[in-house]
Structure formats: C-alpha cells, structure tokens
Image (spheres, rainbow, N blue to C red):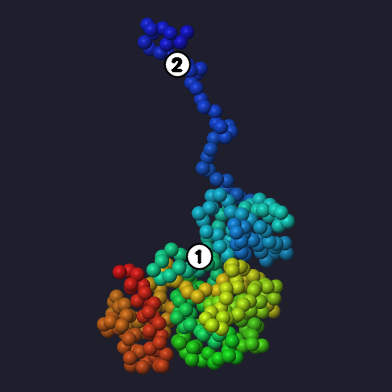
Amino acid sequence: MSWLDDPDDDEPEFDESDIRMRPNPKGNRPRTKRRPAHADARIARVLGVDRGRYTVLVDEDEPSEHEVTATRARELRRQPIVTGDRARVVGDVSGDAGTLARIVGIEERTTLLRRSADDTDQVERVIVANADQMLIVVAAADPEPRARLVDRYLVAALDAGIRPLLVVTKTDLSDPAEFLRHFDGLDLQVFTSARGAMPTDEIGAALVGHATVFVGHSGVGKSTLVNALVPTADRATGHVNEVTGRGRHTSSSTVSLRYRGADGSGWVIDTPGVRSFGLGHVNPDHILAAYTDLAEIAEDCPRGCTHLPDAPDCAIIEAVAAGELGDTGPGRLDSLQRLLATFADRER
C-alpha cells in the first residue's frame, strides 16, 4: 500500500521503486564534450580545397608520400582550413579511390597571408598559411602595371612576416625601367621575363627550400609562369580583353604545387588573380615598414608623426622636398600617404 492510500500517514517514505527514469532515446551512452586525443593522427600538408573536400599530402618528403582526400571533423566547423596548413589527419589515409580521411586539428601556423574586401572592411579572408615568400607578378604592359597594387602586396607580405619578390613579365612589350624605379631603395629581388626568355632557372633557385605564394592581377601571365616552373601544374591561362584592358580570371582556387629544380625542391602556391587587395585587417603601424628607405628617414620624425601632407616637421616630407630621394621620392611618398590616409579615414 502506498502512502497516498493511508491518510493517517503524514510522513511519506520513498524507496528506489518510486523513482521513474526516462530512457535515453539516443542510446545508453551519456553524451560528453570530451573529444578523443587522436594520438595516432598523421601530419599532412593541405594542398587544395574543393567544395568541402581537402587534398592533403601524407608522409611529405618520404618515399611513401601520397595524396589523400579528407573532410573536416565536426569540431572544426568554425576553424578555417586553407592551403598550406599542416593538418592532423585520421581515418583511412591510404589514398585509395573512394576513401575519405578526416582532419581533426590544425598545427600552429608560422605565417598567415590575408586580405579584406576593401580598406574599410576589417573582416579578413585567409589566403594561405605557412608561406615564407610572396612572388608578386606584374606585366610591363597588357595590362599596364599598377604600382599601388604592388605596394599593397608589399604591405600584406610585411604584415604576415613574408619575404616579397617581384617578377615583371612581358618585358618584350615595354621597358619596365620607369615602373621599377618606384621601388628603388626597397629590399626587393626583381626578375624580368619576356616571351621566349622566361628566367625559370633564376626564379626556381629562389623557390628552393621555401613555400612561395604567387599573387598578381588577372592577365599578367602568372599561370603561364607557374606552368613553366611546374610542368605538371596544367593551370589554365587566359588573355587580356582589348577593350577593358583587364585579364580574365583563369585560376579559380588556391593550390600548392611541388617545384623540383636542379638544386632542390620547394612549394609554389598559386592563387586566383585579383584586381584589388584590401588591407582593412592590417595594423596601420606596419605600412611604413614596407617602405624600408622611408622608414629609416622616419626615425627623425617627431613622436606620433602621421607622415600625411599636413604633418608638421615630417622628416620624410622634408627629405623628398629637398630631393634626397631623387626622382622617385615624390611618387613613393604619394603612394605611402594614400595608404596611410585610407587608414586614417577608417578610424574617424
């Protein structure tokens, strides 16, 4: 008889039979946030990303190295995984047709190259991880070179801790000397390339032992250069529109390709061509450092100097006015001030 059936019993007593438990509809194992340690995970290089599938290289630099297709683990759904990442991979890493491994973690990155939609947008887009060099590709003509776009690449490279290099293609169409004077005073290795005279050996020597990200405006010959350096790359090439002077986007994704030269190997990371390179994510303090010659002069500027046209006692402005930087000084100062003014407007 239950205590409810006895009105004189005012102190109910319970036993285990009175406790009702709802069964777990999803099974008998309780849910937990504890994730497996994946001690058996293999380290792999992310070579490319295509619609949620990642091509990774397992056993890099070993006789057994091979490519594997992988997906990301659920716990990494908010973690960007990009070309160049060093990923921890579990599951079937045989690389056989129809198999699928799983990325369960990303190793700490040494560098991260980013860009934003424009200079006012601080939401960044990650381009590549763990690159230590950037090869900026511009054409001497068709399309015309854009010095200020190169300035932006230099700032992004410096902000990421990446060494910049520059190659000028199509020098058979125009002499790039005037364009290159814009970069006098910078610690910038420059290569020139013409139809039938592409310096693949010289450029290749600079790639050995490095992971080099190739960037450039559409139509400058970047994919042609990549195909010359990596004959198996088979990157699509395009042409420049005669009316607009713009190149057609041919490379639609970022991929890592193995460069093999006479003196060793390296990585070529090809990226889609872009017509703009936003720096909204960059710390403005890093911009001046991209102009190493101007940065040295700026050491004599007053504390807090903006280096903008109305900055009082700016050592850079005074040096340019005195002709100490030669004919290229006014153009380089103008380029620097345009970038600095963009960030000054953003902060207002």
The residue positioned 65% from the left and 83% from the top of the image is 201
Q: Relative to residue 191, is residue 196 drawn left or right?
A: right
Looking at the rendered structure, the kind of residue marked 2 is: Phe
In this rendered view, identify the residue nearer to me: 284 or 108. Answer: 284
Alpha carbons under labels 1 and 2: distance apart: 62 Å
The residue positioned 58% from the left and 85% from the top of the image is 169
Q: Is any part of residue 166 visible from this angle?
A: no
Q: Which residue is mark 2?
A: 14
The residue positioned 43% from the left and 78% from the top of the image is 290
Q: Local crowd at mark 1 within 10 Å, few (<14), some, or many (≥20)?
A: some
- The image position of residue 40, as x and y in percent, is 63, 51
**Quadrant housing residue 107:** bottom right
State which tag comes first along the sequence, 1 or 2.
Answer: 2
- The image position of residue 50, as x and y in percent, is 61, 61
Looking at the rendered structure, the kind of residue marked 1 is: Val
Is the C terminus in the top left, top right, bottom left or bottom right quadrant?
Answer: bottom left
Residue found at the far left of this picture: 312
The residue positioned 48% from the left and 82% from the top of the image is 146
**Quadrant housing residue 57:** bottom right
Secondary element type, mark 2: loop
Q: Which mark is residue 126?
A: 1
Secondary element type, mark 1: strand
